[in-house]
Amino acid sequence: MYIMASNHSSSIVPHSNSSKAVYRKGLDPPQQLGLVRSLPDVCPKEPTGDSKSLCDEPSVVADQHKWTIYHSKVNLPAALNDPRLAKRESDFFTKTWGQDFVEIDVLPSSYLPPINKEHFSSYMQQTSLREKNHERCKSICPPKDDYNRTAFSHVNKSRADLDQVPKIFMKPDFALDDSLTFNAVLPWSHFSSASGNGSRDAASAKLLQEKLSHYLDIVEVNIAHQISLRSEAFFHAMTSQHELQDYLRKTSQAVMMLRGKISQIDRVMCEGSLRILRQALTRNNCIKVYNKLKLMATVHQTQPTVQLLLSTSEYVGALDLIATTQEVLQQELQGIHSFRHLGSQLCELEKLIDKMIIAEFTSYARVDLNRPLEEDCQVTEEERLVSLVFGLLKQRKLDFFEIYADEMMATAKNIIKQCVVSTVSQIDEIDAELVTKLADQMRMMNFSQWSDLLQSIFAKFTIFLRRVKATINVIRSVVLMVLDKNQRIREMEVMAAQKSLSSERNVDNDLAYLTHEGLFISDAFSEGERPPAPSSTNTPMDASPSSSSSEPSVGESVSDPECTTDSSSSKDHTLPSVSPGGVEIMMTEDLKLTDLELGKIANNIQELLYSASDICHDRCVKFLLARSKDGFLEKLNSSEFVSLSRSVEVFVQDTEKICGRRSMSLRGALQSQANKFVNRFHDERKTKLSLLLDNERWKQADVPAEFQDLVDSITDGKIMLPERKSGCVEERKPSDFLRVDGQKYAVVGTVLILIRIILEYCSCVDDIPSITTDMLTRLSELLKYFNSRSCQLVLGAGALQVVGLKTITTKNLALSSRCLQLIVHYIPVIRAHFEARMQPKQYSMLRQFDHITKDYSDHIAEISAKLVSIMDSIFDKLLSKYEVKAPVPSMCFRNICKHMAKMHEAINDLLPEEQTQNLFLRINTSCRRHLKNQLCHLNVTNDGGPQHGMVAADIAFYTGNVQALKGLKELDLNMSEIWEQKR
């Protein structure tokens, strides 16, 4: 903080070496005393007149970046002798003047916070004790430096003397003109003439005069002292002023000498060359006038030439000629009275050409799109199309693709109309006189006729889209060529700018060299202009003057650029391009389109191809909706709808290959019809299954060979309907069982039909992938319906009322269980079939098959439990009357074995051996439990007594009969558990 303050506020006062004056600030003299430095000598030495002294003269090259006194705006004497100030400021050498040494208001620094006394409170507390000790030491030990002490005493004495002068004399606004100030300085009240004390007043006046004289002496002494302190600096400044005047006089003489030499050089070396250049310029002006007249003659022929070009449909050439003429009128022939109306006439002609180009493009699009739809998809009159597109781009008619889109819409309508008329005229059953509307005539067709018509429409639209794509590719290639041309022009401009920059640098270097060597500057210009002259190109209408001229090269170099002004831009940037059909195009830079606009046009043209696909699909959708008004599509059978779906899918894929984007309108309409088809498809099969179940008597049915082939077609988890064999087929006898993966399934006729229905669902999904999820939901519903309805008819005994069965036998139950097992066997195959045709995000729907499998398994378990419960009730009825007495075997066990044989006979051929064994193990467990309870009730134990022997004989009879049944020989009945274990 102390250093900063000292840097901004303290300064060193210059004084002579003999003076003992010092600069004093603050209370610590040893830190602020120093020797006074004199001001540097800023004036150079005076030139002596010899050659060596010339280097001391001011030099613009050497001294241009060096600061001298000439850069200052206010000199020191002027600042010290400012007459506007009543007295000199005390902080003259310490205040901040700024770089221009003028008085300015110094703004407070934004980086320094405001400082008050509170900021130094902690410091003062810390240093208060040290200050007391320091003051005490100063009083004890006097200063050793007598020089400083003398200086301090002198300063204190001067300050004491000045204190004697009244403060009124020190005020900046002191003026005796003011009456108050005058009365204060000369108190006339002391002098009263009326009092009569003349001697006393004279004494007072004399005393006042002496006092004012004393004040004047004090001020003069202090002024003299201050002047003595600054005398050396003042005289040094005056000396520097004289030296500066001498230096300026020498410089003025040197400048006069230099001007004389330059005028002599101009007279001797430059006037002749300038005269030659002036004559060359006059010659060039004459050539320019001749070229202007020739150009005016050419412009005068513009309108007849444009009319001739329009008669041959050369719109681009006519527009280029108009644009070139407009440019020439604005740049070269501006202000010529004879051409004052030509610009407006050309503008009107350009507007007429705009209308002609649009009409011509509309006519071309209509003719091209409505020509016969054959396999030929080539673009007709490609040169004409390219010329029209260039003309539209040149005139910035950037919405021309909308015209083409309208023509596409009209052509698509005509294609469908022509196809319907052509097909209806070939059908004899349709009387065009009675049925006048085409829609009504179309609704009178059967499916095969209507399908052929739809195929014809699809074929026509495919050719139509290929033709549109070929035309759009030509248009898009033209736009892309223009875009590529713009990029190449920019590259050429960048290269030209780089070359010009390098050439300018070379010319600057050559000029510097020639000036140093003393050569003619005009020679340097002529040598720099000679190389481009042979390579300069002229247009045909400007070539004759330069070609026929035999003047010197200087004139040619001057006139060539002017001669090529009117067409140099188009000539330099004309780029050849070749369209896709091999048509060569000369593109000029007159197409003032930005890259953004060209890119947008290219994107719009590509969207035009997508729009063509959408138009075709939309017209096909309306065709489908017109045919479906009477419910025709909903009445189609599965094979017909699959055929329709395949035709639509092939058309959608073909259009996607042509256009590169899939249109969804036709597929969406087909999806809507597919949903209706799925609902009808499902309702028909559900109704069919319901009727079959209501008429099912739950007896084992013979399996025709056709159904066996149907099941055999499901191999390796792949589901497909076998192709029906045509012609003479060898008849095969039906079998008793359905063989699936080496197992025999005894089934009812309803299950055979259900298997075929399931395969039809899966096959329909293959043919129409878009209805996969709907078919899965409907198939799940169908399987759940079969499970619930069969449960109601068999387990719930609903078949007694529906079909008229007398009772639900064990054979009915076993047959129902086996049918359910067959469906459970195919559920994983069905699930895999649907999973392969679904998106991963749709896999959650496959959980329906898990629920169906669980429901079927629970149903099968309930049937098994029902069979066990039937035998359990028989055991309860017979064993409750069992008595241990002769004869052996008892009648009770004979009846039990008889019922066991009947049960085995009923289910043995229906259920596989493993299931039969498991079922009889459960039945045996039930028999064992009832027998054990009866023996406990009779208090018969295995004590080896007679009762124990008779029971053992009955058990042996029971065991022998059960194990004698087919497939139960190895069955472990474990009858020892009937006896209570002795504790």
Image (cartoon, rainbow, N blue to C red):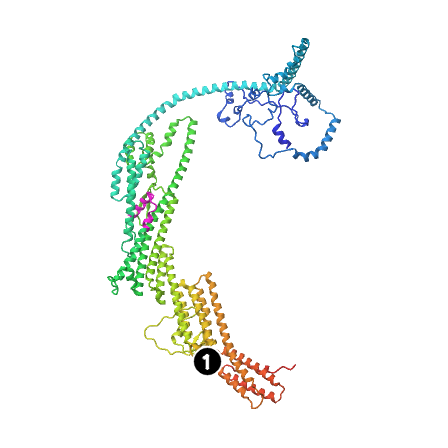
In front of the other: 381 or 839: 839
Question: Circle 1 — which element?
Answer: loop
Residue highlighted by disc 1: 807
Image quadrant holding the C terminus, namely bottom right
Q: Position of residue 364 (x, y in %)?
A: 28, 49
Q: Is residue 26 above or below residue 661?
A: above
Furthest-right residue in view? 140
Question: Magenta segment, principal secondary structure?
Answer: helix
Residue found farthest to the left:
433
Can residue 395 be found in the magenta stretch? Answer: yes
User: Is residue 352 positioned above or below 837 on the image?
Assistant: above
Q: Is residue 564 visible?
A: no
Q: Considering only vertical position in the picture, is 706 above or below 45?
A: below
Residue that protrudes farthest toward the bottom in the picture: 887
Q: Residue 224 lies in what quarter of the image?
A: top right
Q: In the rendering, at what x and y percent does residue 888 appear?
A: 56, 90
Where is residue 883 shown, x and y percent of the image?
A: 57, 87
The answer to which quarter of the image holds residue 744 is bottom left
The magenta stretch spans residue 370 = no
Q: Which residues are magenta?
A: 383-405
Q: Quadrant of the N terminus?
A: top right
Residue 208 visible: yes
Q: Amino acid at mark 1?
A: Thr
Left or right: where does residue 532 sit relative to residue 879? left
Residue 566 screen position, x and y as percent? 32, 35
Q: Residue 511 vs residue 90: left or right?
A: left
